Amino acid sequence: MPFSAIMVIAIPAGPAGPADPASIEPCLRRRAGFTLLELLVVMVIIGLLASYVGPKYFLQVGKSEIKAARAQIDGFEKALEQYRIDTGHFPSTEQGLRVLFAKPNNEPKWSGPYLKKAPPPDAWGQPYQYKSPGEHGEFDLYSFGKDGRPGGSGEDADITNW
C-alpha cells in the first residue's frame, strides 16, 4: 500500500468562518492613515527647507537680472560703435537708442538697422539711459537698476558702461 502524507494548515476561524473580514478590519483601521502629529512634523520640515532654499533662489534671480542688463548694455555698445563707424559720430542724446533700429531723417550715411528690433527696456522694465557726449566717455549708457533711481547698492545699484 503506498504511503501518502497529508499536510494540514490551520487557519484561525473567526465568527463568520475562515479569513473573516471583521477580524482583519480593526488592524487595517489602525494603519490606514497618518496621525495629526506626523503631518505636523512633515509640514515643519518642509517649512524649514523652504526657508533655507527660498532666499538663495531669489538671490540668484536678482543676479540674473543684473547679468541680463549688463549683456544688453554690451550689445548696445557694439551697435553704437557700428553706428559711429557708418556715420562718423554717435547719436545725440535726443536721438537716443531708437536710431539703432529706425533711420533718423537727417542721417544719409545710416546703414542700419543696427539692432534686430527696437531697444527693449532693462530687466526691471525701465528704459536705458543714454547720454552723448557722456560724462565718463564718448557716451554714457546705463540702467538705474531695480529701484529705478540713480545710485544705490546691491540690486539697486546702477549698471553702467564705464
Image (cartoon, grey):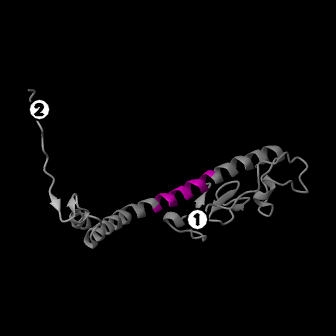
Residue receiving disc 1: 145
- SS label for mark 2: loop
Quarter of the image holding residue 35? bottom left
Which numbered circle lies on residue 82? none
**What residue appears at the point 22 percent right and 64 percent down from the top-left corner?**
16
Q: Which residues are magenta?
A: 58-71
Q: Secondary structure at mark 1?
A: loop
How far apart, in angstroms, are the residues tagged by discs 2 and 1? 92 Å
Quarter of image, res 48: bottom left
Which comes before the other along the chain, label 2 or label 1? 2
Residue 122 image offset from top left, x and y in percent? 64, 61
Q: Type of residue at label 1?
A: Gly
Find residue 3 and report its horizontal and vertical position in percent. 8, 29
- In this rendered view, identify the residue nearer to me: 41 or 128: 41
The amino acid marked with disc number 2 is Ser
Query: Is residue 29 toward the left or the right of residue 1 in the image?
Result: right
- The residue tagged 2 is 4
Viewer-side residue, 46 vs 85 = 46
